Amino acid sequence: MNKLLVTCSHLENELSNKQYDQIEFEIIQPKESKQTFSSEEMKSLLHGVHTAIIGDDEIDFSSIQENKTLKNIIKWGVGYDGIKIHELKNSGINIFHTPGVFSDEVSDLAIGLMISVVRGINQMDQDIRNGVWQQFKGTTFNGKTAGIIGFGAIGQGIYSRLLPFGLNVIWFDPFADTSLDGKRNFEDILLNSDYIFLACNLTPETRNIINKESISKMKNKPVLINISRGGLIEENDLMDALKNKKIKAVGLDVFESEPPINELIKHNQSVFTSHSGSSTFEAINKINKVTLELSKLLLEEKDYSHLPVRKLN
């Protein structure tokens, strides 16, 4: 009997054999629920499994080296940096993710972080709760420049939301296939932006793309917003930049280690959220339906081309 492994906690209450009528299979779930299982833990969990729906888990060659049954890995969500695609290249295992499914939700949060940081919403809220009544002097958006690094569905979603603010919007992405105005190189984004948004995938090339060197090229003491992956930022360099006022403040939904354990979160003017860009009832329901339907079709060996998924290998 084929086995379906589900490690993604968003699906815990959605699984039902009714969704898989007339398929002989068994649903496997870990005894504990957590955001990330290590590659060693996944090796054990994947044993005897045909198809797996995973969250932010780590899978490399050692996870599947001795596995004779695994045919499909479905990544719940967009980011797949925990899966070592190049190591699994010749494994014969199909790897999928769901790009664009919640680009609206993540883009919305990016704008919310920008407004909250620049206008001091979070800081004023805390002051009032502590009995302090004082105005926060922010800056006007109209006429400023916003730079977006990464111009896929989320980057373009941020772009369209920024334009009504009267901002000059520029972007960098060597792989983007679009005619939208504002394309620049990476250095131009750093040099000219008052607000910088990170919306690119985490790859070996983009890891720590925000570091001491790139920060030194930022001339406007910008606000930095990251709604992609924590590994895009060298956090020690970021903390130094905040202390030395090379960067005015940050709005971060993601961190290198989650939850964060460093001094970064003590910066008063910055705003932090708990990797919740996609966390709306509608978005979670939508992606749950897509991943469950895909797993059903893969178990049945049927066509899935109508689903908003992408095969990564």
Image: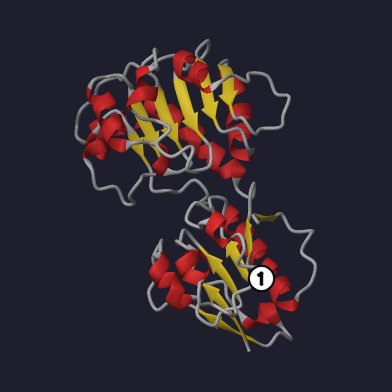
Count the numbered circles shown: 1
Q: Please report the residue visible at 39 percent of the width from the left and 13 percent of the height from the top.
A: 220
Vertical order, 204 against 251 (above or below): below
Q: Position of residue 109 (x, y in %)?
A: 49, 39
Residue lying at the far top of the rendered structure:
143
Q: Is residue 22 left or right of residue 92?
A: right
Quarter containing the C terminus: bottom right
124, 311: nearer the viewer: 311
Task: Name the residue carrying label 1.
Answer: 295
Residue 275 position, x and y percent, is: 42, 48
Q: Is residue 56 visible?
A: yes
Q: Give the farthest residue toward the left.
A: 131
State which quarter of the image contains the N terminus.
bottom right
Mark 1 falls on what kind of element?
helix
Give 166 or 219, whichever is nearer the viewer.
219
Toward which corner of the image does residue 224 lie, by quadrant? top left
Circle 1: residue type: Ser
Residue 100 position in % (x across, y down): 64, 46
Image coordinates for residue 215, horizontal then vertical, percent: 36, 23
